[in-house]
Image (tube, helix red, strand yellow):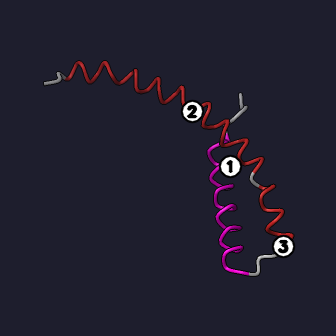
């Protein structure tokens, strides 16, 4: 059976893992937010005639918003 002290010692390690993942996740979010709008161009040029094209456009737009939120703090001091 694990003691409360062993759980307490694991906490800083898990916090360190979370902090070490924050920077690469923000990096990917930022650059995804930069690159994703280029995928909208072919959809807009061919038109959003069908439900598949409209759905793809809206999914890309939603993904871009998520990438903007995730990558917001990248490069900030």
**Dot 2: within a 10 Å radius of its alpha carbon, few (fewer than 14), some, or many (20 or more) residues?**
some
Magenta residue check for 20: no
**Dot 1: within a 10 Å radius of its alpha carbon, few (fewer than 14), some, or many (20 or more) residues?**
some
Please state, as top left, top right, bottom left or bottom right, where the C terminus lies in the image: top right
Of residue 37 and residue 7, the one placed in the foreground of this image is 37
Q: Closer to the N terminus: mark 2 or mark 1?
A: 2
Q: Closer to the N terminus: mark 2 or mark 3?
A: 2
Q: Secondary structure at mark 2?
A: helix
Of residue 56 and residue 58, the one placed in the foreground of this image is 56
The Cα atoms of the two marked residues, 1 and 3, are separated by 26 Å
Q: Secondary structure at mark 3?
A: helix
The Cα atoms of the two marked residues, 2 and 1, are separated by 15 Å
Residue 20 position by quadrant:
top right
The Cα atoms of the two marked residues, 2 and 3, are separated by 38 Å
List the residue tagged with mark 3: 46
| Direction from residue 16 to residue 69 in the image, left or right | right
**Residue sitting at x 24%, y 19%:** 6
Name the front one of labels 1 and 3.
Answer: 3
Residue 68 image offset from top left, x and y in percent: 68, 49
Find out whether the residues at labels 2 and 1 contact each other: C-beta distance under 8 Å.
Answer: no
**Dot 3: within a 10 Å radius of its alpha carbon, few (fewer than 14), some, or many (20 or more) residues?**
few
List the residue tagged with mark 2: 22
| Direction from residue 77 to residue 44 in the image, left or right | right
List the residue tagged with mark 1: 68
């Amino acid at each position: 059976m694990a003691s409360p002290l062993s759980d307490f010692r694991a906490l800083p390690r898990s916090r360190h893992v979370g902090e070490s993942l924050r920077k690469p996740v923000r990096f990917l979010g930022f650059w995804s937010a930069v690159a994703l709008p280029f995928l909208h161009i072919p959809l807009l040029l061919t038109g959003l005639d069908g439900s598949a094209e409209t759905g793809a456009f809206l999914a890309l737009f939603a993904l871009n918003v998520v990438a903007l939120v995730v990558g917001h703090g990248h490069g900030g001091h």
